[in-house]
Amino acid sequence: MTSARQILEQSVVVFSQNYLPLSRINIKRAVVLLVTKKAEPIELITEKGWRVHSPSLVLYVPRQIRLKTASGERIWKVPSVNRREVLRRDHHSCQYCGSVKNLTLDHVIPRSRGGQHTWDNVVTACERCNFRKGDKSPREMGMKLRTKPKAPIHPAILFAEEFWKSVAQEANLE
């Protein structure tokens, strides 16, 4: 039998009105949304949810709920290209060798050769790799980028991608 504590530690996926997965919330928050009729249960995966009992109510909490009202989606814009954001995107590691020490920013196509200060041209590099690459392209120096640089994406889109990948993996396991 599952204890109340184990149930309360579970999470529920919240979808927007348009069925875009937005986030994970705890069971208590899901109960509030269901009881106040701000959300409705949906079943995407054939797994069972949880039964939550109170003295006057028995509520079924599914693993996924959908908001009934349009959520005032906060406006999100791509952050400007700066050291803090590039380091965050690149997980604080050199994009050439993986080092996490003495990090700098590097323009993949050097600015002296027309490279721009944009998300797809700026990466994190350690001092050693940045010095070695110098004013050349990675190809000229025989260096490979570990990941292709790109602009950060909206957190809800990232969550949605991860959610649908996990659903696909669960479907393949069954």
Image (cartoon, grey):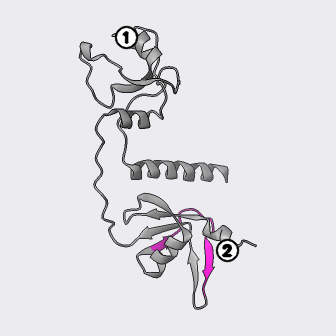
Residue at point 52% right, 27% down?
A: 100
Label annotation for residue 4: 2
Marks 2 and 1 in Cβ contact (< 8 Å):
no
Residue 78 drawn at (x, y percent): 30, 43
Instruction: For label 1, count other residues whose C-alpha is less than 10 Å away and answer few (under 14), some (14-19) or many (20+).
Output: some
Residue at point 62% right, 73% down?
A: 50
> Is residue 49 covered in magenta?
yes
The magenta stretch spans which residues?
40-54
The quadrant in which residue 88 appears is top left
Residue 170 drawn at (x, y percent): 62, 52
Q: Is residue 112 left or right of residue 129?
A: left
Three-letter amino acid code of the residue under disc 1: Gly
Secondary-structure class at tag 2 = helix
Q: Which residue is mark 1?
A: 134
Residue 28 drawn at (x, y percent): 54, 73
Q: Is residue 155 left or right of residue 59?
A: left
Q: Quadrant of the N terminus?
A: bottom right
Three-letter amino acid code of the residue under disc 2: Ala
Residue 25 drawn at (x, y percent): 50, 64
The residue at the far right in this view is 1
The quadrant in which residue 150 appears is top left
Judged by depth in the image, the label closer to the viewer, 2 or 1, is 1
